[in-house]
Image: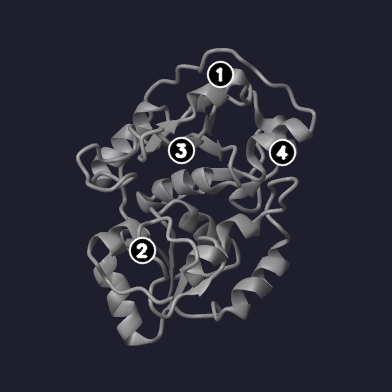
Amino acid sequence: MATEPSSPLVSAAWLAEQLDDADLRVFDTTVHIRSDGEGGVEIATAVDLWNEGHIPGSGRLDLVGEVSDPDAKLWFTPPAAADLAAAFAAAGIGEGTRVVLYDSRFNMWATRAWWLLRSIGFDNAFVLDGGMKAWTAGGNAVSTDPAPIHPPGRLVAHPRPAIFTDSDGVQAAIAGHSTCVINSLSPENHNGTDAGYGKPGHVPGAVNVPAAGLVDPETQCYRPLEDLRAEFEGVGATSGPIITYCGGGIAATSDAFILHLLGHEDVTVYDGSLRDWIDQDLPLEV
């Protein structure tokens, strides 16, 4: 029997109780980002992990192809709101459905999908805390069955344009001195010792709350919210507008998701993030 959780973050135990509900749609959102062996980078939906074993009744949500603009210069750029809604609807998401999103990498792919759904006004979506690791750790069944085929959903976009921002928005925020800009990448990226995106440093004035550090390294579940509140408050994310960024707008959604859970209403993700910033040769601090 369907029960509504008290927040967008749900446990494996909660999901196990809901798994047979007809209105439920469960999706693995994991993406591989890895070397292509020739000095470049390959991105691909993690079909191999899903084939090895997935939550029973779950399908795959393709963040690389299905819900990204194939003609955009930067990876994972979302299409126009109506096209994004149509892509989600084709997967069976729409009015009268509940959606649970999970992944195999500290929740950031699931929060990316959650943030995209929120950007078009769909709020009946949830992130599985700890993803596939938490599911198996709870002793729950794992399936290798084919993905279910859901009837298309009815999903009309009600865009929330403030969900995302661009480099102009970030520069305006820096100039205004009233926005907390948070780098969700590693401390090494922030201090400039890791120039993995082609140029060392962080957006001027940004502070650092790594998305990978939001979770317990053993369980992959988020750390207690009060601990995370203290961490964000420690870097100045107390009130007022907040912008999160990372390398390409993925890990930044994990920080943004937690800030949403903590009650922050004015949180924006810089889509494109460092890849866009560096591509425009904008300044970085080391």
Bin the neighbour count of mark 1 within 10 Å (Cα to Cα): few under 14, some 14-19, many 20 and up. Answer: few
Q: Going by the image, does 280 lie left or right of 271? A: left
Bin the neighbour count of mark 4 within 10 Å (Cα to Cα): few under 14, some 14-19, many 20 and up. Answer: many
Disc on the earlier residue, 1 or 3: 3
Q: Going by the image, does 154 lie left or right of 150? A: left
Where is residue 283 shown, x and y percent of the image? 30, 74
- What amino acid type should be assigned to the residue bearing mark 3? Arg
Task: Give how far apart the Cα atoms at labels 1 and 2 are.
Answer: 37 Å
> Splitting the image into 4 quarters, where does residue 152 fall?
top left
Q: Are marks 4 and 3 in contact (CB under 8 Å)?
A: no
Q: Nearer the viewer, mark 1 or mark 3?
A: 3
Mark 3 — residue? 34
Disc on the earlier residue, 4 or 3: 3
Q: Nearer the viewer, mark 4 or mark 3?
A: 3
- What amino acid type should be assigned to the residue bearing mark 2? Lys
Q: Which quarter of the rendering shows the N terminus?
A: top right
Mark 3 secondary-structure assignment: strand
Where is residue 272 shown, x and y percent of the image? 33, 56
Q: Going by the image, does 27 lie left or right of 274? A: right
Disc on the earlier residue, 2 or 3: 3
Disc on the earlier residue, 1 or 2: 1
Bin the neighbour count of mark 2 within 10 Å (Cα to Cα): few under 14, some 14-19, many 20 and up. Answer: some
Q: Which quarter of the rendering shows the C terminus?
A: bottom left
Mark 1 — residue? 51
Task: Give how far apart the Cα atoms at labels 2 and 3 are.
Answer: 19 Å
Task: Give how far apart the Cα atoms at labels 1 and 3 are.
Answer: 19 Å
- What amino acid type should be assigned to the residue bearing mark 1? Asn
Q: Are marks 2 and 3 in contact (CB under 8 Å)?
A: no
Q: Are marks 1 and 4 in contact (CB under 8 Å)?
A: no
User: Which of the two residues, 239 or 213, is positioned nearer the viewer here?
Assistant: 213
Q: Residue at x 52, y 31 (%)?
A: 27
